[in-house]
Image (tube, grey):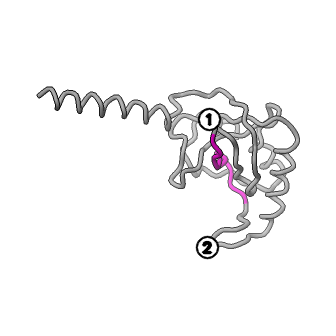
Amino acid sequence: MKLKLMLVAVLFLSGCGMLESTDTSGTTDQIDVKVTQVIDGDTIKIIYEGEEVTVRYLLIDTPETNHPRLGKQPLGSEATEENRRLIESGDVSIEFDVGDRFDDYDRLLAYIYVDGESVQEQMLASGLARVAYVFPQTHVTRRF
């Protein structure tokens, strides 16, 4: 009986730790990060919690540049270059939405800001991105 209780306690406590690392629990604070690479118009690599991780932008979708099925789409290179220009123009921070922090491809899901300005909004304004509700978002979507 003691072994069963101890096993349940260990599983419960380890489960709490897993939730904390993947769920934002309503946190919407911006976190300063270092960008290591611009991958395309809606994806970058950053240093987060001491590790390099891929970040998929919430709320927008841009043309593909190297998709396994779709290949290179029109304006994909232009979207990548606009994203690079924005990212390299100042200090970058990320903000999570309520829900899981990672998608099915193990990419961190976040809103991206440069000097406090939304990169998603700027990509939409440039005409190189579209609003896409790829992942559940809640607190920022009402602006779009």
Question: Which residue carries the number 2 mark?
Answer: 69
Where in the figure is residue 78, as x and y percent of width and height? Answer: 84, 61
Q: Tell me the quarter of the picture where residue 136 sits.
A: top right
* Quadrant (top left/top right/bottom left/bottom right) for the N terminus: top left
Q: Is residue 60 magenta?
A: yes
Whether 46 is drawn above or below 25: the answer is below
* Quadrant (top left/top right/bottom left/bottom right) for the C terminus: top right
Foreground residue among 59 and 3: 3
Whether 94 is drawn above or below 123: the answer is above
Q: Earlier in the sequence, mark 2 or mark 1?
A: 1
Image depth: mark 2 or mark 1 in front: 1
**Overall secondary structure of the magenta stretch?**
strand
- In the image, is 132 to the left or to the right of 14? right
Residue range highlighted in magenta: 51-62
Question: Which residue carries the number 1 mark?
Answer: 49
| Whether label 2 touches label 1, CB < 8 Å | no
- Which residue shows up at 51% across the image and 40% down it? 100
Where in the figure is residue 138, as x and y percent of width and height? Answer: 57, 36
For numbered disc 1, what is the local secondary structure?
loop
For numbered disc 2, what is the local secondary structure?
loop
Q: Which kind of residue does numbered mark 1 sit on? A: Glu
Foreground residue among 28 and 3: 3
Q: Is residue 92 magenta?
A: no
Spatial distance from mark 2 to mark 1, Cα to Cα?
Answer: 32 Å
Where in the figure is residue 30, as x and y percent of width and height? Answer: 69, 29
- Which residue shows up at 74% across the image and 44% down it? 120
